[in-house]
Amino acid sequence: MKNRTVFAAAFVLIGLLVILAPTVLFAVCESEKKMACYYTGKAVIGIGILIVALGVVYFFLKNKGTRLGIAIAEFFTSGLVLAFPLKLTGLCKMSDMACRVKTLPALIVVSILLVIVSLIDIFFLAKGEKSE
């Protein structure tokens, strides 16, 4: 199987995990009042859609330089996955809320996974290995 296909599938899968983490798998707090975790969940869904879109585009590209650029973009996008819950929009203040207990650890794991996959891809593409 071609490395391009493997990395594209990995990016799409990780993007789907980012989308599903705050909605289905480890849903953020449910409340009638829209709290910070609600907005974090919406932002993370948007970032997940971006990760999936980059993975789909990655699959159709044959140029190694362009794929390298997408892999670098995926690397920096992983930082956005963590920036929203930790710094930008935040989460609930109480430490026992679902967003802090479930959603944040899931997003951390998925973000680390995206960093690892994108760094491996960057290494292969930059080194000039046969990545077709």
Image (cartoon, rainbow, N blue to C red):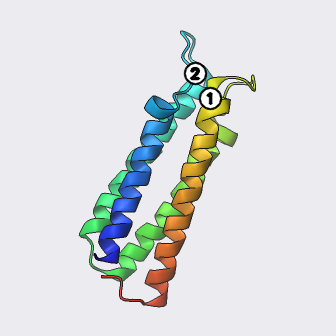
Image quadrant in which the C terminus is located = bottom left
Q: Is residue 4 visible?
A: yes
Please rate how many residues cluster around mark 2, counting C-alpha atoms within 10 Å: few if below 14, some from 14 to 19, many from 20: many
Q: Give residue 68's quadrant in the image.
A: bottom left
Residue at point 54%, 25% (across, down): 38
Judged from the image, the secondary structure of the residue bearing numbered disc 2 is loop
Q: Is residue 80 visible?
A: no
Residue at point 33%, 54% (across, down): 53
Q: Could you tell me residue 114's position as x and y percent?
A: 52, 59
Q: CA distance from mark 1 to mark 2?
A: 6 Å
Q: Is residue 60 left or right of residue 14?
A: left
Contact? badges 1 and 2 (CB < 8 Å)? yes
Image quadrant in which the N terminus is located = bottom left
Give whichever of discs 1 and 2 has the lower sequence position: 2
Under mark 1, the amino acid is Cys
Q: Which residue is mark 1?
A: 99
Residue at point 51%, 74% (across, down): 120
Q: Which residue is mark 2?
A: 29
Judged from the image, the secondary structure of the residue bearing numbered disc 1 is helix
Under mark 2, the amino acid is Cys
Identify whether 114 is placed above or below 19: below
Residue at point 24%, 68% (across, down): 60
Q: Is residue 77 left or right of residue 105?
A: left
